[in-house]
Amino acid sequence: MIGFYNYTVILTYVSLLISVFGMIQAFGGGFRTAILCLALSGLCDMFDGKIARTKKDRTDDEKLFGVQIDSLCDVICFGIFPAMICYLVGVRGVFGSLFVGYYCVCSVIRLAFFNVLETRRQAKEDGANKYYHGLPITSMAVILPVVFLLQTFIVPSVFIVMLHFALVIVGTLFIIDFKLKKPNNVTLFFLVAIVSAAVLIILIFSSYRVPKLRFPEMPLWPMIKRLFKA
């Protein structure tokens, strides 16, 4: 079998599975469950690197595989997943689609740039990097639940506008090159507490109604004939 199978990547896969489940829930209108899944996925991502570094005998290929698999999963968990939640909740239309697309492009650029820097760094030194270049993509697992928390106190139209701004601002911060010191354990605990409180309030008090998507119904055979019509 291709790939590397050890405990260093298990938490990354768990994060991905949680996000996939959250996507399924979001398509069914369960945005509260989706937000919970996003927060849990972010929690897994906080510790996957720490767990990976406990294995001291990793080969260079195993380290590079860890970098690549982490970023590939992050594209889904913190790039596509949050964008999909925003779209399903109401960020639609021309501008909404542009903002969703912009956020996704910025997230891919940010992760690709991270892969380049991290691969180069690991060739020269061991251990974890002490700084982020730009806003880390996992920050959306903190920001989006907080924005959804505000939804319980404001009217839906203002909430949708805030989601538009969140996508553009956070996406832009992904690709602006500034140094951000990685949080210590106390800061991580503080962030987990904030997100946990936000998710709990959303689950208990939120009454937001997700607009249902309407997909046009078309019989299969006429559609096939239309595709192959000369």
Image (tube, rainbow, N blue to C red):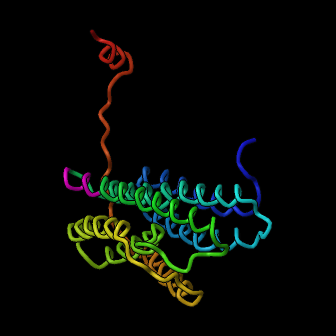
Q: Is residue 97 magenta?
A: yes
Q: Is residue 185 above or below residue 157?
A: below
Residue 228 position, x and y percent, is 33, 13
Left or right of residue 56: residue 220: left
Residue 216 position, x and y percent, is 29, 34
Residue 149 position, x and y percent, is 37, 76
Q: Is residue 137 magenta?
A: no
The N terminus lies in which quarter of the figure?
A: top right
Q: Is residue 63 above or below residue 134?
A: above
Secondary structure mostly seen in the magenta stretch: helix
Q: Which residues are magenta?
A: 94-99
Query: Extreme top residue here?
Result: 230
Residue 220 position, x and y percent, is 39, 21
Residue at the image position 58 percent from the left and 55 percent from the top: 68
| Residue 163 visible, this orientation | yes
Left or right of residue 166: residue 35: right
| Residue 17 visible, this orientation | no
Q: Is residue 38 above or below residue 225?
A: below
